[in-house]
Image: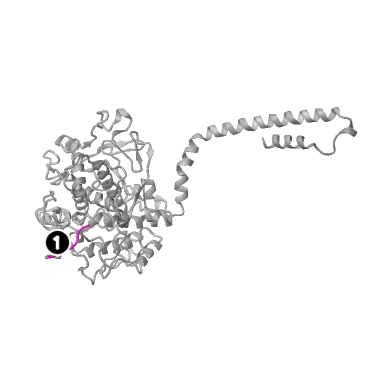
Amino acid sequence: MLLAVLYCLLWSFQISTGHFPRACASSKNLMEKECCPPWRGDGSPCGQLSGRGSCQDILLSNAPLGPQFPFTGVDDRESWPSVFYNRTCQCSGNFMGFNCGNCKFGFSGPNCTEGKLLVRRNIFDLNVSEKDKFLAYLNLAKHTISPDYVIPTGTYGQMNNGSTPMFNDISIYDLFVWMHYYVSRDTLLGGSEIWRDIDFAHEAPGFLPWHRLLLLLWEQEIQNLTGDENFTIPYWDWRDAENCDICTDEYMGGHHPANPNLLSPASFFSSWQIICSRLEEYNSRQALCNGTQEGPLLRNPGNQDRARTPRLPSSADVEFCLSLTQYESGSMDKTANFSFRNTLEGFASPLTGIADASQSSMHNALHIYMNGTMSQVQGSANDPIFLLHHAFVDSIFEQWLRRHRPLQEVYPEANAPIGHNRESYMVPFIPLYRNGDFFVSSRDLGYDYSYLQDSDPDSFQDYIKPFLQQASRIWPWLLGAAVVGAVLTAMVVGLTSLLCHHKRKQLPEEKQPLLMEKEDYHSLLYQSHL
């Protein structure tokens, strides 16, 4: 009943922020290659009249790429987003968004000057009301068309270089499903030819920053949609789990009594339709996923290929990952050894750190274990468990950052697979974000994890950080007051000494006291303290 009430109440909030802006989907925008929409607050492009930002040329990195993708000029995602746009909004200060209408992560308020730190919590720590609200938010996002964003249903070439736009509406939830498909789809080479060994968000250094950004933007979507500014994605701590304990009707949906591959009719996720799951069909037609519904959500946890994924990850597996000191190594792809990223992603053994193509462990293990929609890379975000899973993966990434405290230069600047260099813009996000921008602590992006707060030795420093920042703004006044106080103290002490010396001169030597009177002692002591 509570879910139904929340669902109905929330239909009145229909705001979104995301990635092919509707305002930039016209033939004029595509042919001029400019995406600088006006900010609603003042009507000027990028909110320039209000000092929020300005329309500027995009500066692309020219750092060399790895050898994994041997083509140039055949994929719209190369040198993102230059195939579609070469001018976008560049926002100032703490402003962000395709029209500089939002605040950077970690800031809020009308002028984006108010810092905030939100906390992601274990889904089992949510009370019934909080849990039901989260489920209602998911369902609302699934059934609300994004007013600000559309998805392309053809390549730039199929759009006749922009003169014939091809875009479809999409729901807020499915927008993120489509993005996860688009970033990992195969390259269409024409005819019946495709190139499979390409992925702008997996199997390389950008895996963790890319998914970190995806979750942040998804949270921002829900906050805007519902007006709940404190919403955060809960995480599922799957360490040492013996089964899928969130796969119940109370949480993310249980088994269907008659068909183990379907969800229980008692879960409203059983009515969800998935998109972007038929990769081979798209490849054969040299087409993109257009958001058409493709059937129900599938999930059969625990009945996976046990030769490839014998169990869910353990606490020891996570600890081994965290002990690896190198973020990336070697070829910086799924064959990398002793790479924290490759081991956490699941292409290297959490026992040895050696790449093993026959096994799927850690992050990959959860996808395989679910044995359904979530087990195929391009369509995996259809399953809402994807969000809870990746929130926990992100928390492990955060633990590693706090333990090893790497400089941003640790993230590879060059020779990573296409799209994964430090200064490369992440596909398919507009506004633009670089991989290296998210190789920082989550607290610098405005969020933390509840279980990391309890054990973090720096939590006290974070607690007093706002007070230190405030003190830094008033330190000139404090310094001036200290100087004035010192001058006054010196004057009082000097005057007192002069008076005492004058008094002693007036007394005969034999009448001068050997010890101060009690009152004189306390008077001098007080002056000294003053």
Q: Nearer the viewer, residue 289 or 386?
A: 386
Q: Nearer the viewer, residue 522 or 61?
A: 522
Asked if residue 401 shows in the view, the reply is: no
- Which secondary structure, mark 1? loop
The overriding secondary structure of the stretch rendered in magenta is: loop
Position in image of residue 186 (x %, y %): 18, 55
Asked if residue 328 shows in the view, the reply is: yes
**Which quarter of the figure has residue 157?**
top left
The type of residue carrying mark 1 is Leu
Q: Nearer the viewer, residue 356 or 382?
A: 382
Q: Residue at x 29, y 43 (%)?
A: 60
Q: Is residue 341 left or right of residue 275?
A: right
Q: Nearer the viewer, residue 486 or 7?
A: 7
| Residue stretch rendered in magenta on the structure | 252-257
Q: Find out whether residue 56 is within the magenta segment.
A: no
Position in image of residue 3 (x %, y %): 20, 49
Residue closest to the far right: 510
Q: Is residue 276 left or right of residue 126?
A: left
Residue closest to the far bottom: 307
Position in image of residue 43 (x %, y %): 24, 28
Asked if 478 appears above or below 458 in the picture, the reply is above
Position in image of residue 94 (x %, y %): 35, 38
Crowding near pointer 1: few (<14 within 10 Å), some, many (20+)? many
**Which quarter of the figure has residue 41?**
top left
Asked if 85 appears above or below 268 in the picture, the reply is above
Q: Residue at x 39, y 61 (%)?
A: 322
| Image quadrant containing the C terminus | top right
Q: Which residue is mark 1?
A: 262
Asked if 115 appears above or below 325 in the picture, the reply is above
Give the colour scheme shown.
Answer: one colour
